[in-house]
Amino acid sequence: MKPFAVTLLAAALLAGCDDMNDIDTVPPAAPRGIVTISLDNAVEIQWLANTEPDVAGYKIWYSDRYDGRYEVLGSTDQTHFVDHGAVNGRTVYYALTAYDFARNESELSTDVVYDTPRPEGLNVVLLEYRADASRSGYDFSTYSVGNYNDDLTDFFYEYSAGRTSLIVWSDSDIQDMGYTGSLDEISTAPVNGWSPTKSAEAIVGHTYVIWTWDDHYAKVRIREVSTTRIVFDWAYQTAAGNTELKAAREQRARRGPLEPFRGPAEE
């Protein structure tokens, strides 16, 4: 072989070695800062963007229990994703991985969050019970307005001696959580602090948590108040005993290793 050809061959081999050294085998860090927002038959998952410049996207994983088998729900190049398959009253656990353009994928996130979606309603009108008893009470279990003294009524509206009040029956509880900018500011039901009078003054902009007779939690935010009626928004947790009412969930520290299920759904 001529010296010139040997030189070219050596250069090609050296270039090939350099190319091998340039292959990216380093996966991104696992996503952080994961929170969820409870929706009506849906859950929105949000997280912080990874700082690596070569991150191509994220995979969202889910399971029906914390230490269960996590399967791929979907993927996105954004920092939010909506699980439209979630069902009201059913808790779902979520975790994330990040992947880069070389198809390197991170471990599952160390922050695993869960959420229980719940129904909600807007601009519901209740009349003062003396003015129209048949339209003065609300039943969360059927999402309906009815008579204030119906067996299923969870609360009703009263105006008396210049005071506007939300009232629950003796087998239920209510608590004024104070002013909120939106219904979603109250994330969970309180442990104590329930009204000893089974009533709370109805104030525009205030949100109230109600513990129903059959061990469900609900919340109500007042939009309008007059001597004859109130207008409110509401959310109701269909899972008995579950205090989750909204969505911006705190991060949950992982207690042990979680294993993703890498099967056909991921490919």
Image (cartoon, helix red, strand yellow):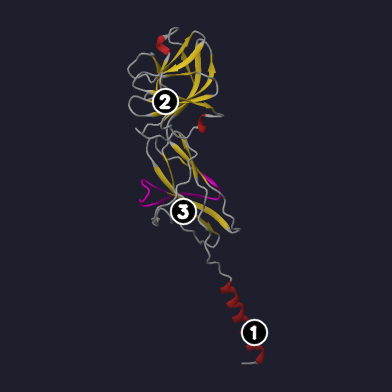
Q: Are marks 1 and 3 in contact (CB under 8 Å)?
A: no
Label 1 is placed on what type of residue? Leu
The residue that appears at 59% across and 73% down in the rendered structure is 19
Q: Which residue is mark 1?
A: 8
Of callouts 2 and 3, which one flags the residue occurring earlier in the amino acid sequence?
3
Q: Which residues are magenta?
A: 62-81
Residue at image point 34% right, 29% down? 215
Q: Which residue is mark 2?
A: 194
Residue type, mark 3 in image: Thr
- Identify the residue shown where x is 43% and y is 30%: 119
Quadrant including the C terminus: bottom left
Residue type at tag 2: Trp
Where 216 falls versus 53 (above or below)?
Answer: above
Q: Position of residue 105 (x, y in %)?
A: 49, 59
| Residue 21 falls within the magenta-colored stretch | no
Viewer-closest of 137 and 158: 158
x, y percent for residue 240 = 34, 32
- Residue neighbourhood size for the residue with mark 2, other residues' Cα within 10 Å, grouped as few (<14), some (14–19), many (≥20): some
Q: CA distance from mark 1 to mark 2?
A: 85 Å
In the image, residue 50 lies at what x, y percent?
56, 54
